[in-house]
């Protein structure tokens, strides 16, 4: 996964130069610089680094609009 955005109390923050170095179930371990402004309670938005690492795990992928509302359901066809 790649860090796409960071939010604190609903407001966007500068995206740090964070790197996911390990995954464990639903947990992502981040490596961040000492100068990065990341705090407990911040919301970190992740994106996938490669589509195949995500799409082959789900039978349906949901498409959202700019406001985040689900507008489409796309079935997947992986073996």
Image (spheres, rainbow, N blue to C red):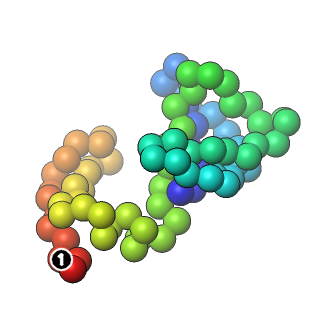
| Relative height, residue 65 to residue 12 (above, below) | below
In this view of the protein, can residue 3 be seen by the observer?
yes
Callout 1: SS: loop
CA neighbours of label 1 inside 10 A, class few (<14), some (14 to 19), many (20+): few
Q: Where does the image place residue 46, in percent across and percent down from the top left?
A: 50, 49
The one nearer the camera, 57 or 11, is 57
Q: Where does the image place residue 72, in percent across and percent down from the top left?
A: 15, 57
Q: How many marks?
A: 1
In this view of the protein, can residue 4 be seen by the observer?
no
The one nearer the camera, 16 or 23, is 23
Q: Residue furthest front?
A: 24
The one nearer the camera, 60 or 13, is 60
> Which residue is located at x 14 percent, y 59 percent?
73
Q: Is residue 52 left or right of residue 38?
A: left
Which of the 4 image quadrants contains residue 26?
A: top left
| Relative height, residue 71 to residue 9 (above, below) | below
> Which residue is located at x 48 percent, y 55 percent?
47
Q: Where does the image place residue 32, in percent across and percent down from the top left?
A: 76, 43
> Which residue is located at x 19 percent, y 71 percent?
76
Which of the 4 image quadrants contains residue 54?
A: bottom left
Q: Residue furthest right?
A: 34
Q: Where does the image place residue 22, in percent across and percent down from the top left?
A: 62, 53
> Which residue is located at x 21 percent, y 80 percent?
79
| Relative height, residue 25 to residue 55 (above, below) | above
Q: Is residue 14 left or right of residue 49?
A: right
Residue bearing mark 1: 77
């Amino acid at each position: 996964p790649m860090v796409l955005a960071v939010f604190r109390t609903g407001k966007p923050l500068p995206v740090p130069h964070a790197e996911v170095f390990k995954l464990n179930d639903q947990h992502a371990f981040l490596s961040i610089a000492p100068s990065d402004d990341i705090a407990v309670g911040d919301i970190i938005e992740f994106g996938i680094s490669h589509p195949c690492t995500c799409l082959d795990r789900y039978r349906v992928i949901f498409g959202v609009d700019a406001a985040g509302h689900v507008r489409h359901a796309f079935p997947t066809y992986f073996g």
